[in-house]
């Protein structure tokens, strides 16, 4: 806990040597200039937000950032994963150019993961790189996409295929924004929280099993604890492997299967967290086939995912060939070898590129559909 602000909050850091940056977590932080102004590069500020988030929080954030002669503008983009395209990022660049913003401008991403990814990518490219700050308003973006510097957009042939690593100057997580989050979006965020337990912290799995009802009921203390633990795990992994040359790929547990679902079903029809939830169960089931997990452990994973309100089946319209054709485009693949993040045991993930093709085919054929 720190006392530099009038509001109670907790802070941890992503340790990247000279590019070390803080993650602030607490209630009401988007109203607090002390949480935001120190991380601006200059007097020019562009808030990037969405049509859903703008009516809720844009004016409050503008008020916190205004003053001392700062030029604070905004661009409001449509909602949805299907809008995460180069065309949307070009709208951000157009707004920056129209405003005459220079290399000392700062982009502030106010919204969920789609907004954060696009604003970060726009910042990475505008005049070869300008500052940005993350103010995530969904649980998924608070525990995952806002931390670590992955930015980018989707391509019709694959999710997040165009992008850059570009770290924010700070991540400001106002836990009160979760009170306006729809239940489906909250569940989608819980998929990423569950992921951290599965890949690195078996005690966190037990904690989630005991508190899942409280999390879904928006218990403030439970949510804060879950956010802090999730961010701490991600910060540790990012510090060790910023550009995903090794360990950071473990954060993609369930994502190879999940991205295939998102791409096949059409971006936005399955929320990212919903697809990851089903994907993590597919990864656990494949880990069992490899002899690494016991059947009761897979059932434990399934129960936790279901308790979070997430799907535990794949789309009925997807065949095994549909999965494979998209999974072969995954960025983790090397030399045409399909690399999957699996579980050597609960709380311990690994990257595996030697799954027998007949075993993977059987999993993709037999996994329940609905």
Image: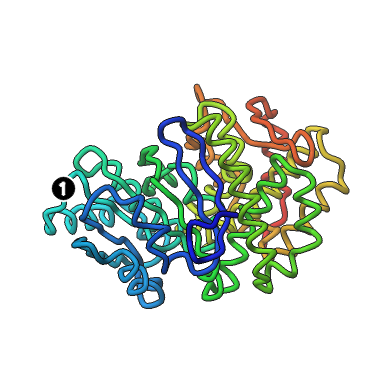
Residue 175 placement (x, y as % from top left): 55, 66
Residue drawn at (55%, 62%), measured in percent from left and top? 26
Q: Position of residue 256 (x, y in %)?
A: 57, 42
Residue at 27% across / 66% down in the picture? 66
Picture quarter with the C terminus: bottom right
- The percent position of residue 64, horizontal first and vertical second, equals 34, 67
Q: Quadrant of residue 283?
A: top right
**Residue toward you, 175 or 85:** 175
Q: Identify whether 292 is placed above or below 39.
A: above
Residue situated in front as seen by the camera: 115 or 37: 37
Q: Residue at x 81, y 61 (%)?
A: 210
- Disc 1 is placed on an element classified as loop
Image coordinates of residue 368 in percent, x first then y, are 72, 55
- Vertical side of 186 occupied by 113: above or below: above
- The residue at the far front in this view is 3
- Give neighbour class at mark 1: few <14, some 14-19, many 20+ (Cα, 10 Å): some
Would you name the residue on which mark 1 appears? 102
Q: Please name the residue shown 22% across and 44% down the image.
A: 126
């Amino acid at each position: 806990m720190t006392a530099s602000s009038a509001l109670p909050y907790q802070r941890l850091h992503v340790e990247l040597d000279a590019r070390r940056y803080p993650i602030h977590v607490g209630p009401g932080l988007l109203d607090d200039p002390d949480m935001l102004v120190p991380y601006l590069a200059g007097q020019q500020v562009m808030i990037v937000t969405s049509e859903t988030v703008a009516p809720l929080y844009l004016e409050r954030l503008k008020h916190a950032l205004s003053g001392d002669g700062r030029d604070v503008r905004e661009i409001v983009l449509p909602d949805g994963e299907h809008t995460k395209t180069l065309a949307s990022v070009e709208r951000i660049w157009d707004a920056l150019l129209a405003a005459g913003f220079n290399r000392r401008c700062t982009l502030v991403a106010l919204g969920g993961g789609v907004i954060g990814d696009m604003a970060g990518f726009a910042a990475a490219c505008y005049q070869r790189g300008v500052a940005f700050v993350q103010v995530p308003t969904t649980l998924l973006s608070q525990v995952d996409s806002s931390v670590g510097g992955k930015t980018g957009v989707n391509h019709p042939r694959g999710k997040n295929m165009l992008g850059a690593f570009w770290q924010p100057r700070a991540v400001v997580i106002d836990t009160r924004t979760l009170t306006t989050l729809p239940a489906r979006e909250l569940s989608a965020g819980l998929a990423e929280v569950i992921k951290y337990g599965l890949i690195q912290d078996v005690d966190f799995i037990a904690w989630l099993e005991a508190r899942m009802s409280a999390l879904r009921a928006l218990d403030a203390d439970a949510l804060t604890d879950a956010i802090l633990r999730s961010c701490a795990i991600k910060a540790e992994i990012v510090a060790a492997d910023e550009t995903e040359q090794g360990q950071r790929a473990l954060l993609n547990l369930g994502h190879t299967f999940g991205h295939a679902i998102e791409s096949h079903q059409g971006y936005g029809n399955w929320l990212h967290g919903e697809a990851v939830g089903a994907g993590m169960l597919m990864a656990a089931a494949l880990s069992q086939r490899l002899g690494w997990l016991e059947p009761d452990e897979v059932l434990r994973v399934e129960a936790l995912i279901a308790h979070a309100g997430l799907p535990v089946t794949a789309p009925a319209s997807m065949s095994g060939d549909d999965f494979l054709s998209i999974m072969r485009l995954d960025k983790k693949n090397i030399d045409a070898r399909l690399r999957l993040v699996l579980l050597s045991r609960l709380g311990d993930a690994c990257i595996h590129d030697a799954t027998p093709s007949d075993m993977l085919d059987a999993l993709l054929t037999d996994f329940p559909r609905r």
